[in-house]
Image (cartoon, helix red, strand yellow):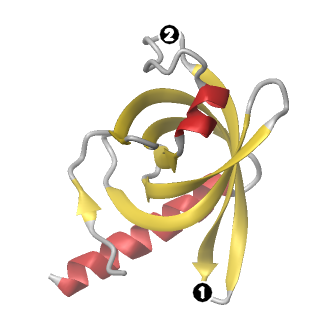
Amino acid sequence: MKPVAKPNLRNQQRVDVTTKITIEKPDGGCLTCSVSNLSRTGIMVSCNQEAIKELIPDQRTPAPGRWISVKTRFSVPVIPTQPVSVIADGNIVHMRRIARDEFQLGIQFSEFEGNGFDYIDRYVGKLLSDARTLL
């Protein structure tokens, strides 16, 4: 799949990414969803309705200041043959229904463990550079 830069709605360009993500709720329960796109400041995740009910019981976008804290774990291939794990705390700041059993969650990163931000910065930068080369 060719990476495509999305409009800049987060103050950072997004890149399409397909990978799995584990989302840990404040109570310690974990869910696995799919990543739709990634930027240096956040991630868009695709989930089914069952996962949404676990993460957002009332199934409404969290109001500003009432965001839902989560911990995310996913991998990015900083070196093509060696993916690295990124662990980041974040807040669910956006939710929308895409289809009957498909929702998107916007998670804004708040803090990274270790070199997580550097890994994302390099990976997003590389995908954006590759996309410009294809134009």
With respect to residue 33, does 54 lie above or below?
Answer: above
Residue at point 42%, 29% (across, down): 94
The 10 Å Cα crowd at callout 1, few under 14, some 14 to 19, many 20 or more, is few
Report the disc number at residue 65. 2
**In the rendering, at what x and y percent does residue 74 appear?**
67, 58
Image position, residue 115 (x, y; %): 70, 57
The answer to whether 103 appears left or right of 11 in the picture is: right
- The furthest residue to the left: 135
Position in image of residue 112 (x %, y %) = 68, 44
Report crowding for label 2: few under 14, some 14 to 19, many 20 or more residues within 10 A (C-alpha): few
Residue plotted at (54% across, 15% down)? 58
Q: Residue tagged by mark 1?
A: 80
- In the image shown, does 1 or 85 lie closer to the viewer? 1
Q: CA distance from mark 2 to mark 1?
A: 38 Å
Q: Is residue 44 left or right of residue 20?
A: left
| Disc sitting over residue 24 in the figure | none
Residue type, mark 2 in image: Gly
